Amino acid sequence: MTSFTISPLTDRTGAEVVGLDFTEPIDPQTRTTLNRAFAEHHVLVMRDQHFTPEQFKQAAQVFGELQQHDKKEHHVPGHPDVYYVSNDEIVNGRRIIPGETFHTDHSNHPRPPKATMLFAVELPSAGGDTQYVNVHDAYDDLPVETKQRIDGLKVVHVYLSKYSPRPLGAISEESRRDVPAPGIHPLVRTHPENGRKALFLNPVRMESIVGMEDEEALALIDELMRHATQKKYEYRHKWRYGDWVIWDNRSVMHQANPDYDMSERRYLYRLMLRGEVPV
Ligand code: SIN
């Protein structure tokens, strides 16, 4: 077995993996160790990787099966199933920074992706960190009365909520046709591998809570978002070249930071992995 280390990056969220080259085959024992570490730490940072788009796609499958993105047109030229995020897109005079507020990826899907990953290709000279907050810990810390109030609630997640705090980038007609019907998901879900409960939140896509007036639903979502995004739940990733970061959408929310010089490019390959129906 190859020698490598997995070291926590904070007390509760994030771990760094050093000493593996994911362009080489990963043996079954290492694969098991990595997947266990992923369920425990929720965000893994694999250092010193060097990927072509195809190598990235191969490496991703150490953690699961690939899931296509809604915006199929946002793919790396010549690689239809390797996507990217960048700061290049301007819509109606406004620069779109994908993932600029805390959210959970593609939560509008009936089976939302269990994981998302980025590989740094071009980085600004300063800033552009990604923040992750641990939604297991956030749930655990809620008062008992709040847990009783929210356990069992169902939420309707659409492609873009009329209450979204930000717009999404343009989507082609062809991609829009393939967007699935809204997902109706529990507000509190249980992670199938680590067994922990978690808040399942995404203000970009949450349109309503079943059986609740919108005003009350928005106030509840706002209260839960304020609670879950406290610094004590955070791991903040400062990108370095060579970083491949994978996060568990069942355990963390995340956001991108638009705090850098926009004349510099930020461009990362992005892939997602299939998930299950949230319960
Ligand atoms: C995303 O929300 O997937 C993008 C995060 C980032 O660019 O840091």
Image (cartoon, rainbow, N blue to C red):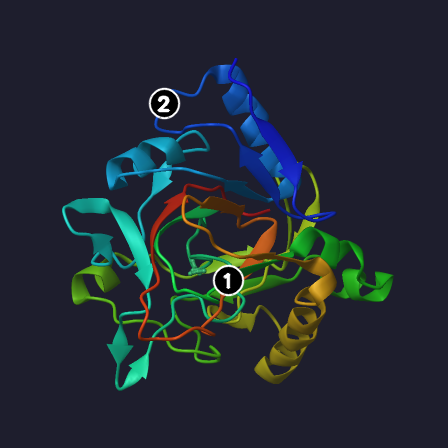
Residue 275's label in the rendered image is: none
What is the secondary structure assignment of the residue under circle 2?
Answer: loop
Residue ID for mark 2: 24
Which residue is located at x 48 percent, y 46 percent? Answer: 245
Dot 2 amino acid type:
Glu
The residue depicted at 38 percent of the width and 71 percent of the height is 97
Residue that label 1 marks: 129
**Residue 104 horizontal/vertical position (percent):** 51, 59
Q: Residue furthest top?
A: 1
Side of 49 relative to 9 (left or right): left
Front residue of 172/216: it is 172
- Crowding at label 2, few (<14), some or many (≥20) Cα neighbours within 10 Å? few
Ligand 1 rendered quadrant: bottom left
Q: Is mark 1 within 8 Å of ligand 1?
A: yes
Mark 2 or 1 closer to N-term? 2
- For the residues labelled 2 and 1, the Cα–Cα distance comes to 28 Å
Q: Is residue 32 above or below residue 80?
A: above
**What residue appears at the point 53 percent right and 21 percent down from the top-left corner?**
30
Q: Secondary structure at mark 1?
A: loop
